[in-house]
Image (tube, helix red, strand yellow):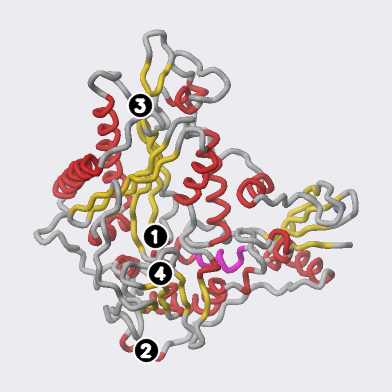
Amino acid sequence: MRVHAAAASDEISRSYVRCAPEHGVLHRVVREQLLTFLWKLDQRHDECGVPLFVKREFQRFVRCGVLAHGFARFWCAGCGTDRLVAFSCKGRGFCPSCGGRRMTERAAHLIDHVLPRAPVRQWVLSFPFALRYRLAWDHKLCRAVLAVYTRALLGFYRQRAKGPGPPEGRTGTVTVIQRFGGALNLNVHFHTLAVDGVFVREPDGSLSFTAAKAPTDDEVEALLGVIQKRVLRLLVRRGLLCEEGGESLDETEAPPLHALYAASVRQRVAMGRRGGATVLRLGDAPTTTPEPRRRRQARLSGFDLHANTSVRAKNRPKLERLCRYLLRPPVAEDRLSFASDGRVIVRLKTPWRDGTSHIALEPQELLEKLAALIPRPYVNLIVYHGVLAPNARWRGEVVGFGTRSKTPKGPASSASRKVAGPCNRTWAELMRRGLEIDVLQCPDCGGRMRFVAAIMLSSAIRRILDLLDLPSDPVELAPARAPPELDDAWAC
Ligand SMILES: [Zn+2]
Ligand SMILES: [Zn+2]
């Protein structure tokens, strides 16, 4: 029997179908350090312990993509070749493999089932440090701030379309709530794709679209002023704004994640020998020139709004790339490496303006950062507003706008308004779309492979893998070790 293990095939080893994940930096660090990390957290907070969703995310991650923990078997009827595809963890926090697949899936969904064939502009809103921390911690507050911001943005489009133009224009937005910054730091911010113009109901019942002019720098600044004022008002209403506008939470009393969040937001280390210190930066000599303001960018007391990226209606491939950028996972394996002293070097996607191109983290510090990035279960990080909201009356028509099939007139039926789920795309389809790889194509004869069975029983897994001379030992976590620096753990 000729066999291709998906995890070992050159053909699909690129990027998101991980090649032998247990050899990756991330996997090794989690495998070797997880139990120590959880033990340290539990020591500090024995009364409440580490939340289950954090433990689970890590534990599942170490089994993700490892054949010895189960796989699906595909078979080519033409030449008898087998292919084994390891199961994945479906983690939402940091798994590069599952995050990559989810990115491809969601981006394809946005392109095929949500964003109309109309120009789109990206608006990025980020927040002062103290607020980032609160938004990461309190998802309800995060959604409330998002609602305030998108209301202002939708109003901005409506207002600009007024005058001689159509009186009752409406637009819609899709926002991805990103929890991370470029250095694995916790940085909750919003990437919003807004349909760049307004839809109007014509007297004959049809829907027409008027593109908006690109906003000027002054308009972006004025809009940010409105957003900032309304967000602060919201915080005051909820009693969250103390005199100095700082954090009123007592971190020493807070459960374990508070301390990790607070440190990550400020690029600091929470635990261990270096507790309280900033993460180690590597790179060129620091430059002192302040970052120039970019086009269509405004800053106001820690708030930042940027709106210079737009995509024309016809450029769907660029829009799909932009969607993937919004939906990307926080860490890519190829940006991680080990230094000779065992620290993990993280290459930044874009060097900071102070010259930093890499950061160096102790393995335990890396786990701190990863733990802070794991979202709570069931929180929704993709949110639709305006005419793209799931219950919007025009949604069905807007989504179909500009497609070859004639846009239906009049209010859409409830069936057509229904938000399509991320569809029943097969894994093979997604790989073809995201990576231009056809995983169901037989590597030997080019024929189509078909699914044979999911192998989950450990005795069966071992028997098959041993037969094929593939590694069959399940991943073992290294036992927890009391680190020498325990005495001064949690210095921050
Ligand atoms: Zn995974
Ligand atoms: Zn074949």
Q: CA distance from mark 2 to mark 4?
A: 19 Å
Outermost residue toward the top in this view: 204
Circle 1 or circle 3, nearest the eye: 3
Outermost residue toward the left in this view: 243
Residue stretch rendered in magenta on the structure: 56-64
- Residue labelled with disc 3: 198
Mark 2 residue type: Glu
Q: Quick one: label 3, few (<14), some, or many (20+) residues within 10 Å? A: many
Give the residue at x 54% y 79%.
32
Element at label 3: strand
Q: How many marks?
A: 4
Relative side of 458 to 262, left or right: right
Mark 3 residue type: Val
Relative side of 20 to 153, left or right: right
- Residue labelled with disc 1: 180
Element at label 2: helix
State which quarter of the image contains the N terminus: bottom right
Q: CA distance from mark 2 to mark 1?
A: 28 Å
Within the image, what quadrant is residue 241 found in? bottom left
Circle 3 or circle 2, nearest the eye: 3
**Lower sequence index among marks 2 and 4:** 4
Image disc number at residue 369: 4
Give the residue at x 61% y 63%.
64
**Lower sequence index among marks 3 and 4:** 3
Mark 4 residue type: Lys
Q: CA distance from mark 3 to mark 4?
A: 41 Å
